[in-house]
Amino acid sequence: MMKLMNIRTCCLAILLVVVPLVGSAAEGKQEAAKRAALEWLVLVDAMRYEAAWKEAASLFKAQVSTSDWAKAVATARSPLGDLVARHLISATYATSLPGAPDGEYVVLQFQTGFENKAQAVETVTPMLDEGHWRVSGYYIR
Protein backbone atom coordinates (compact mmCIF):
# COMPACT_ATOMS: atom_id res chain seq x y z
CA MET A 1 0.00 0.00 0.00
CA MET A 2 2.82 2.39 0.89
CA LYS A 3 4.57 1.63 -2.43
CA LEU A 4 1.37 2.45 -4.38
CA MET A 5 1.05 5.79 -2.56
CA ASN A 6 4.69 6.63 -3.39
CA ILE A 7 4.07 5.86 -7.07
CA ARG A 8 0.93 8.03 -7.07
CA THR A 9 2.78 10.84 -5.33
CA CYS A 10 5.63 10.58 -7.82
CA CYS A 11 3.20 10.61 -10.80
CA LEU A 12 1.37 13.62 -9.38
CA ALA A 13 4.67 15.46 -8.89
CA ILE A 14 5.65 14.75 -12.51
CA LEU A 15 2.28 16.01 -13.76
CA LEU A 16 2.61 19.18 -11.70
CA VAL A 17 5.96 19.87 -13.38
CA VAL A 18 5.16 18.74 -16.95
CA VAL A 19 1.68 20.26 -17.45
CA PRO A 20 2.78 23.86 -16.84
CA LEU A 21 5.76 23.33 -19.18
CA VAL A 22 3.47 22.13 -21.98
CA GLY A 23 1.19 25.13 -21.47
CA SER A 24 4.18 27.45 -21.35
CA ALA A 25 5.56 26.06 -24.63
CA ALA A 26 2.23 26.62 -26.42
CA GLU A 27 2.00 30.13 -24.98
CA GLY A 28 5.52 30.89 -26.20
CA LYS A 29 4.61 29.70 -29.68
CA GLN A 30 1.44 31.79 -29.62
CA GLU A 31 3.41 34.87 -28.63
CA ALA A 32 6.03 34.33 -31.35
CA ALA A 33 3.29 33.75 -33.93
CA LYS A 34 1.46 36.89 -32.78
CA ARG A 35 4.63 38.99 -33.16
CA ALA A 36 5.17 37.63 -36.68
CA ALA A 37 1.53 38.30 -37.60
CA LEU A 38 1.64 41.88 -36.31
CA GLU A 39 4.88 42.59 -38.20
CA TRP A 40 3.27 41.19 -41.36
CA LEU A 41 0.10 43.23 -40.82
CA VAL A 42 2.21 46.40 -40.70
CA LEU A 43 3.12 45.69 -44.33
CA VAL A 44 -0.51 45.07 -45.28
CA ASP A 45 -1.66 48.21 -43.43
CA ALA A 46 0.95 50.24 -45.36
CA MET A 47 -0.34 48.75 -48.65
CA ARG A 48 3.04 47.06 -49.17
CA TYR A 49 1.32 43.97 -50.55
CA GLU A 50 4.27 42.62 -52.52
CA ALA A 51 6.49 42.85 -49.43
CA ALA A 52 3.80 41.09 -47.37
CA TRP A 53 3.66 38.31 -49.98
CA LYS A 54 7.46 37.93 -49.84
CA GLU A 55 7.35 37.63 -46.03
CA ALA A 56 4.50 35.08 -46.05
CA ALA A 57 4.84 31.33 -45.54
CA SER A 58 5.83 29.13 -48.47
CA LEU A 59 2.35 27.54 -48.30
CA PHE A 60 0.77 30.98 -48.82
CA LYS A 61 3.07 31.81 -51.74
CA ALA A 62 2.38 28.43 -53.37
CA GLN A 63 -1.37 29.14 -53.33
CA VAL A 64 -1.44 32.68 -54.74
CA SER A 65 0.82 34.71 -57.03
CA THR A 66 2.15 38.09 -55.99
CA SER A 67 -0.11 39.95 -58.42
CA ASP A 68 -3.24 37.95 -57.52
CA TRP A 69 -2.56 38.53 -53.81
CA ALA A 70 -2.04 42.27 -54.33
CA LYS A 71 -5.31 42.55 -56.29
CA ALA A 72 -7.31 40.51 -53.78
CA VAL A 73 -6.05 42.31 -50.67
CA ALA A 74 -6.39 45.74 -52.28
CA THR A 75 -10.00 44.90 -53.23
CA ALA A 76 -10.77 43.76 -49.69
CA ARG A 77 -8.90 46.44 -47.74
CA SER A 78 -9.11 49.65 -49.81
CA PRO A 79 -12.80 50.37 -49.14
CA LEU A 80 -12.20 50.02 -45.39
CA GLY A 81 -9.84 52.97 -45.16
CA ASP A 82 -6.96 53.35 -42.74
CA LEU A 83 -6.48 51.20 -39.66
CA VAL A 84 -7.88 52.78 -36.49
CA ALA A 85 -7.39 50.00 -33.92
CA ARG A 86 -6.57 46.29 -33.71
CA HIS A 87 -6.98 44.11 -30.61
CA LEU A 88 -6.30 40.40 -30.27
CA ILE A 89 -9.45 38.52 -29.27
CA SER A 90 -8.23 34.92 -29.57
CA ALA A 91 -5.15 32.81 -30.25
CA THR A 92 -5.43 29.08 -30.82
CA TYR A 93 -2.49 26.73 -31.35
CA ALA A 94 -3.16 23.83 -33.74
CA THR A 95 -1.25 21.10 -35.53
CA SER A 96 -4.00 20.37 -38.03
CA LEU A 97 -6.28 22.74 -39.93
CA PRO A 98 -8.88 22.03 -42.63
CA GLY A 99 -7.36 22.18 -46.11
CA ALA A 100 -3.81 22.61 -44.85
CA PRO A 101 -0.97 20.15 -44.32
CA ASP A 102 -0.23 19.10 -40.76
CA GLY A 103 2.19 21.45 -39.07
CA GLU A 104 2.30 24.07 -36.34
CA TYR A 105 -0.21 26.90 -36.67
CA VAL A 106 -1.62 29.63 -34.50
CA VAL A 107 -5.01 30.99 -35.54
CA LEU A 108 -5.22 34.60 -34.39
CA GLN A 109 -8.39 36.66 -34.47
CA PHE A 110 -8.28 40.43 -34.12
CA GLN A 111 -11.14 42.85 -33.52
CA THR A 112 -10.18 45.57 -35.97
CA GLY A 113 -11.55 49.02 -36.61
CA PHE A 114 -11.00 50.91 -39.84
CA GLU A 115 -11.83 54.42 -40.94
CA ASN A 116 -14.86 53.24 -42.96
CA LYS A 117 -15.74 50.08 -40.99
CA ALA A 118 -15.79 50.34 -37.24
CA GLN A 119 -16.07 46.58 -36.56
CA ALA A 120 -14.24 43.90 -38.54
CA VAL A 121 -12.65 40.60 -37.61
CA GLU A 122 -9.29 39.75 -39.12
CA THR A 123 -8.13 36.14 -38.96
CA VAL A 124 -4.39 35.74 -39.44
CA THR A 125 -2.84 32.29 -39.37
CA PRO A 126 0.92 32.11 -38.94
CA MET A 127 2.58 28.73 -39.33
CA LEU A 128 6.01 27.46 -38.39
CA ASP A 129 7.76 27.53 -41.78
CA GLU A 130 11.42 26.52 -41.95
CA GLY A 131 11.92 27.45 -38.31
CA HIS A 132 10.19 30.85 -38.54
CA TRP A 133 6.61 31.92 -37.89
CA ARG A 134 5.17 33.23 -41.17
CA VAL A 135 1.64 34.05 -42.20
CA SER A 136 -0.08 31.29 -44.15
CA GLY A 137 -3.58 32.75 -44.26
CA TYR A 138 -5.40 36.07 -43.96
CA TYR A 139 -9.15 36.63 -43.93
CA ILE A 140 -11.21 39.67 -43.09
CA ARG A 141 -14.93 39.92 -42.47
Image: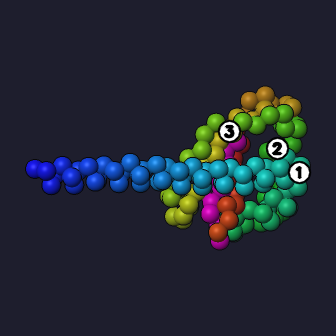
* Callout 3 secondary element: strand
Does the rendering let one see residue 32?
A: yes
At 53% from the left edge and 51% from the top edge, which residue is drawn? 24
Task: Identify the residue under disc 2.
Answer: 77
At 65% from the left edge and 41% from the top edge, which residue is drawn? 109
* Callout 1 secondary element: loop
Task: Identify the residue under disc 3.
Answer: 88
Contact (Cβ within 8 Å) of mark 1 with mark 2: yes
The one nearer the camera, 76 or 129, is: 129
Q: Is residue 95 shown in magenta?
A: no
Indicate the quadrant containing the C terminus: top left, top right, bottom left or bottom right: top right
- Give the magenta-colored segment's residue range: 122-130
Q: Amino acid at mark 3?
A: Leu
Which residue in the rendered view is the most extreme toward the bottom? 130
The one nearer the camera, 12 or 112, is: 12
Q: In this rendering, which labeled residue sits more in front, label 1 or label 2?
A: 1
